[in-house]
Amino acid sequence: MAIKIISIDIDGTLLDDQHKIMPAVAEAINQARQQGVKIVITTGRPLTGVMPILKELDLVGADQYVITHNGGLMQTTDGSEILFSEALTLDQWSEINDFMHQEGIYLQAESQDQAYTTTHLVDPWASFENSLVNLPLHVAENDAAFEKVELIKGIANANADELDRVEKIIPESIHQSVSVIRSTANNLEFVNPIASKGNALLALAKQLDVAQTETMAIGDQENDRTMIKAAGLGVAMGNAVPAIKQLADVITADNNHAGVAQAIHEYVLD
């Protein structure tokens, strides 16, 4: 069946190692759009961190869609309508926050367009991440300050070795309550168990009356697992981690050799 929705991860997928969209990738995406295919940027970033990319690809509008916060939120790219949203409860957040404080790991929560933490010493990785995605950070004294905030996800930022250590000892009670996702070497994320890139993709397909078999997902990291598994055609980048390559239906070129463009030309364009 013809592909009608393409879900595309950003870092290591859409972008090359210089954090640029290669001309061949931009052209393939444009050709797919002209053919009537919905291009859905699907990312752990908030909308503020995706908007420059959406503008570059001319994907801003009330009839264009973006999946953010690793599937915690799906909305129109102009921000006018939210179609899918699953947040953390304050109790879920507090348990994760207490554990990370105990282990000395920086943690923040993210709403649609703001970040919040109860840690006064902000990790350099968090400073880099917040700058990258244009997310203002609020420092609060305690979790009570978040009672009226929709906490779409929690994200721990630290060097890779520290996150490797803490990921192995996360309490089972946290694993049973939320989904734990290692999105990059320096990011460990916590989302509502219903929230995932895959579930958001399927929700969009249902909204647009598109069959699951008419969807394609392209990614490279563990946080892309659910959408690659959910899509009718799951595509792993050539630079993807081994587990994602094993899961995917097909493997395309890496992000420095326009793998997204190769996949679109091979499986989507007439």
Image (cartoon, helix red, strand yellow):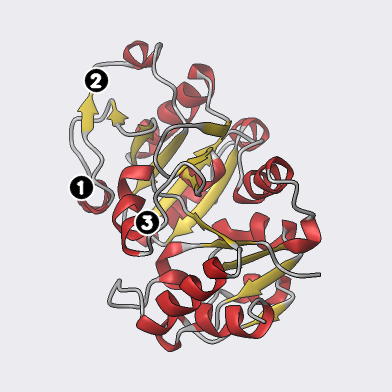
**Placement of 150 over or under 152, stated as above or below:** above
Q: Earlier in the sequence, mark 3 or mark 1?
A: 3
Dot 1 corresponds to which residue?
A: 127
Q: Quarter of the image holding residue 245?
A: bottom right
Q: Quadrant of the C terminus?
A: bottom right
Q: Which of 241 and 220 lies nearest the eye of the viewer?
A: 220
> Which residue is rendered at x = 75% and y = 62% of the image?
214
Q: Secondary structure at mark 2?
A: loop
Q: Secondary structure at mark 3?
A: helix
Question: In the rendered structure, which amino acid carries the disc numbered 3?
Answer: Leu
Circle 3 packing at 10 Å, graded few (<14), some (14-19), many (20+), is many
Q: Which of 66 and 164 lies nearest the eye of the viewer?
A: 66
Q: Position of residue 249 (x, y in %)?
A: 74, 75
Report the Cα–Cα distance between label 2 and label 3: 32 Å
Residue 90 appearing in the image: yes
Q: Which mark is residue 157?
A: none
**Placement of 163 over or under 179, stated as above or below:** below
Relative to 41, 177 lies left or right: right
Q: Earlier in the sequence, mark 2 or mark 3?
A: 3
Q: Secondary structure at mark 1?
A: helix
